[in-house]
Amino acid sequence: MNYTGNIYIQKSDIYTDKEWNNILSSNYNLFFDPVFLKYNDEFSKNIVWHNLIIKSKKKSRNLGIITGCEILSGKEKIFVSCRGTSFGGFLWKEKLSVINYTEAINIFSDYLKDNGFTFCTLNNPPNLYNSDFNEEYEYSLLENGFKITKDSITNIIKLQFFEYIKLSNPLKRTIRNSAKNVTISIIDNPIDSNKYERFYDILLQNRLTKNIKPTHSKEELIYLKRNLSGRIIFFSAEVENVMCGICVLFIIKNDVILNFYLATDENFKKYRVADYLLFKTIEWAKNNNYRLYDIGTSDVGGKLIEGLFNFKKKFKADGFLRKSFSKKL
């Protein structure tokens, strides 16, 4: 426990800590949910956790939380927020002032030094995820010596302004034609093993054509779906009762959807399954009163994939940054 001034840091066992869940109840984020994070331990990923609660002495208030883990690289002991998730960083319980952010980040830096860390990387979500966002938190990071060491562009739709009529005529024509042949449905629990074999095979084969593997194994994805069925939504696309496309949505915040996987079977390419499946899941999110739909990043290794970006852009998904902040301690 580190004390300096008004703010201090306390390490948390998130699986038993009621205070951690109390903060989540006021500002939910899937990647801070102990039920989600537990899959890393269940599947023996050997993560050494440093999950922390930021506290204030005044009225014993909890200000925020941060997920973190340690990575050893030679003589370096690195704090990363966070492995096993798309992003981490600080999750604040409430909107604070730049003064509070600065003090908290100073105390956080002291914690890292006291625990032998020599480097720190925070992978932050887009600012847009916060409905009342400002940039005071990022300013405090920069003032504390953090630098933006990596950025990635992700395509986000503001669902309030998304309307079918605003799409281009070629895209609307594609959607109308696909609707004649393609059926979209949600796969609910319990998961049918035969259907799920086909579901995951489409994902795996699609990723192999891009020389990558899915982030999650088949077993991991089943585990997450079973334990977070209300937060992880499986969609399938079928042509003549044959599954030809899949989509996995993560409900990251109570009003934010992240499209984590979108994959189709190339044998059904003529039906433009990807366009129709993406449209129907966006439509589902809007009809269920979500605020944002994040289609995901459009760059790899710092290089923009123009075709992917343009595919997402035609659905009125503007580009926003995911930033990684790093500091040598």
Image (cartoon, rainbow, N blue to C red):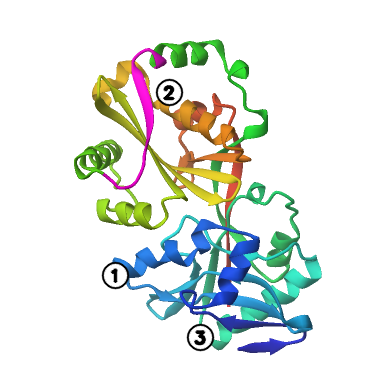
Relative to 31, is 13 above or below?
Answer: below
Secondary structure beneath dot 3 equals loop
Q: Look at label 2 and name its amino acid.
A: Tyr
Instruction: Say which residue label 3 marks.
Output: 116
Q: For residue 223, what is the image quadrant?
A: bottom left
Q: Decide whether residue 185 is among the magenta residues.
A: yes
Relative to 155, is 99 above or below?
Answer: below
> Which residue is drawn at the image coordinates 41% and 11% (left, top)?
177
| Magenta residues (range) | 179-191
**Do the numbered discs 3 and 2 sit on residues whose CB atoms are within 8 Å?**
no
Q: Nearer the viewer, mark 1 or mark 3?
A: 1
Where residue 60 appears, as percent x and y from the top left, is: 72, 82
Mark 3 or 2 closer to N-term? Answer: 3
Instruction: Say which residue label 1 marks.
Output: 44
Relative to 284, is 4 above or below?
Answer: below
Alpha carbons under labels 3 and 2: distance apart: 51 Å
Secondary structure beneath dot 2 equals helix
- Residue 37, visible in the rendered structure: yes
Q: Is residue 230 left or right of residue 100?
A: left
- Residue 264, visible in the rendered structure: no
Q: For residue 164, what is the image quadrant?
A: top right
Mark 2 or 1 closer to N-term? Answer: 1
Instruction: Say which residue label 2 marks.
Output: 276
Q: Nearer the viewer, residue 190 or 145?
A: 190
Where residue 96 appears, as percent x and y from the top left, is: 77, 65
Quick one: quadrant of the N terminus?
Answer: bottom right
Q: Residue furthest left?
A: 194
